[in-house]
Amino acid sequence: MNETPSRRRSRGVSMADVAALAGVSSQTVSRVSTGHPGVVESTRRQVLDAMRELGYRPNSAARALKSGEFRTLGVILFTLATTGNSRTVEAIAAQAAQEGYAITLIPVAVPTQDGVLGAFTRLGELAVDGVIVIMEVHLLDAVELQLPPGVQVVVVDSDAGDRYPVVDTDQADGARQAVRHLLELGHDTVWHVTGPEESYSSERRTQAWREVLSDAGRPIPPIERGDWSAASGYQAGLRLAARPECTAIFAANDQMALGVLRALQENGRRVPQDVSVVGFDDLPESASYLPPLTTVHQDFAEVGRRCVQGLLSQIRDDRGEPGTVLVPTTLVARASTAPPSS
Amino acid sequence: MNETPSRRRSRGVSMADVAALAGVSSQTVSRVSTGHPGVVESTRRQVLDAMRELGYRPNSAARALKSGEFRTLGVILFTLATTGNSRTVEAIAAQAAQEGYAITLIPVAVPTQDGVLGAFTRLGELAVDGVIVIMEVHLLDAVELQLPPGVQVVVVDSDAGDRYPVVDTDQADGARQAVRHLLELGHDTVWHVTGPEESYSSERRTQAWREVLSDAGRPIPPIERGDWSAASGYQAGLRLAARPECTAIFAANDQMALGVLRALQENGRRVPQDVSVVGFDDLPESASYLPPLTTVHQDFAEVGRRCVQGLLSQIRDDRGEPGTVLVPTTLVARASTAPPSS
DNA sequence: CGTGCGAATGTTTACGTAAACATGCTGCTC
DNA sequence: GAGCAGCATGTTTACGTAAACATTCGCACG
């Protein structure tokens, strides 16, 4: 009652306070707090009671200062607006929490080298033991030296496997499955709506699409380029709808596929009777598109898990082995694909 | 060359190292580092040069330990999988970065009181100055006392305005706009697909829907309940498609609206000729649904900004005023609504 | 020409924790 | 029963920073 409740930041309860109440030394409190052995049960109980009574919480800053570890991982990315990124981040956060690590989000304001540079500069002052970079790595080239010493890195969505550890969905295999599915249905060839040039995922999918067609001796139609958005898919779809010879389309993600579906159907091309469409990602709502979309399922959760596992093992070993971990994909056949009608 | 590069955690450069190189005391380095006045230009330059040469980075743990501030905000939420959450978090991260704060993500493993309790327990050990809670607040009731002293809180998606500061989209007004739009088009009444019971947003939208109908003297049809997913919207849509008297539907989010669209059209009910549909959220892809969806636009970015501003002003004042900040919505009329055909 | 004041810089200390080392006690062996 | 092993616990110290206090020096003013 005699306190000053308006006092700012009450300088929480410290080990010394707990130690005083429990009648032990603060080192014993520390041992209990960190779960070290060598504390007899009765003492431990006394300490725990005192902790509870005072509402003791370990001060993570002091802990970090002492141990040199923050038990925090940074995640650098451009945006959470894409499903892939937000799902990956969610899995990263869940896995990290399970390992006793927190996640600090480091958004890059503008997707340019300057923006990335800024993020890495801020990173230098941030309390993280490692970083997961979710972006194409050539945007990183200018800044790779900026990594603070002792901070490890894992990269997603990149082909930098020769320089950094990389975890990624098996983009190529997913795209191959999509294209082969359409060829097996009997289509002569497969048209393609790709994503932005600067995206590694996009380029990888396009490359695999071209390879499958080429290996099968099929003609390679011109590429329609989108920007991942449904609106850009719609524009691409309008152009494809005008080509009667186009009977099968592989869109580089589900959102663009959605735009393609609308463009086709608004222009009298029925899906799948006249044109088959395959997407990539398997968003939860893809099954509710009109018609339900055949697509390539990505296991974002697994990507996130592997990122964290890889990063933590680096942190513990103090060295990152370059190399790439690929997470497999599966084709989910729904109602947007069928044999050509002719 | 003579170093031991394999040495773990090189115990980065400290102020003492910089001070030694620059030939000054470490306190002078501190003054330069924090931008304090009272350092003559020539000395400052020497120190800055030494910092650059050694690659000095302030140790945020030591700083936090000394100052009692972490310059970090925590965000507690169930999932990033919903568009609203991930967009809000993104805005929060951007605004916080601008204010010099980092964001730590605290995912709640399971959406139960136990899960929330666990998250708040972890929070106690986390280095944050404030917390943004993105969830219905009654899940918090059991744990409100667990807030570490000095940690402020702002709540999103809740009606706890009498206990905590709350920032939220104006759910009620958005829903009113949606329902009025349908009535103004000439529909007798409006059917409703609601979200999960435990969601405050969902309940608030439903309540506003009921009020508008009631005020207009219209019959109030039975509610169809979904769980925010397109699949649940599809199920609800199937039931509504079977009712010929249903000509106007307000779905509590865009994804359920997508499911409704599919159910209607697969069962021969044309949209918007036979049935009009309105959603809520204005997802980027809603404009590409078949037909493009009339929906209520939410300004997630503004919600995020307001959260951070509110929280930081609390942190600086040391007290949170309960109260609610409402962010306005706008109706975006597209092609899924029209006057009834009869 | 001495006094004193203020600006620039240095020294000491505390923040909370945990490793390293020190102490004291119990109980067992020969 | 002396000695010592081994365990429970206490004491000291360092982590990197920044506030508080101390010192030095130059210059203005009487």
Image (cartoon, coloured by chain):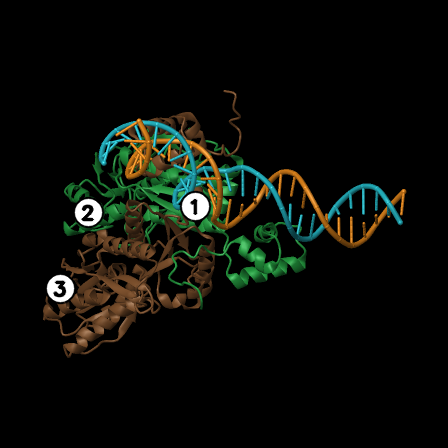
Chain colours: A brown, B green, C cyan, D orange
Position of residue A52 relative to residue B28, above or below, is above
Q: Please tell me whether mark 2 sits on a helix, a strand or a loop.
A: helix
Mark 3 or 1, nearer chain start: 1
In this view, the residue in front, B186 or B10, is B10
- Give coordinates of residue B196: x percent, y percent: 25, 37
Under tag 1, what secondary structure? helix
Does residue A270 appear to the left or right of B192 in the view shown? left
Q: Which mark is residue B231?
A: 2
Toward the top, the furthest residue is A1
Q: Quadrant of the C terminus of chain A?
A: bottom left
Label 1 sits on residue: A66
Packing grade of label 2 (10 A; few <14, some 14-19, many >=20) is many
Q: Which mark is residue B300?
A: none
Percent across and percent down for residue A212 are 17, 73
Residue A32 horizontal side relative to residue B262, left or right? right
Same subunit, tags 3 and 1: yes
Pair 3/1: label in front: 1
Question: How far across and how far down the image is residue B328, in percent?
Answer: 42, 42
Q: CA distance from mark 3 to mark 1?
A: 67 Å
Q: Please state which amino acid type lies under the numbered disc 3.
A: Gln
Mark 1–mark 2 CB contact (< 8 Å): no
The image position of residue B174, as x and y in percent, is 36, 41
Q: Which sits in the foreground, A69 or A306?
A: A69
Q: Amino acid at mark 1?
A: Lys
Is any atom of residue B207 visible in this view?
A: no
**Picture residue at 48% right of the left edge, 51% below the top:** B59
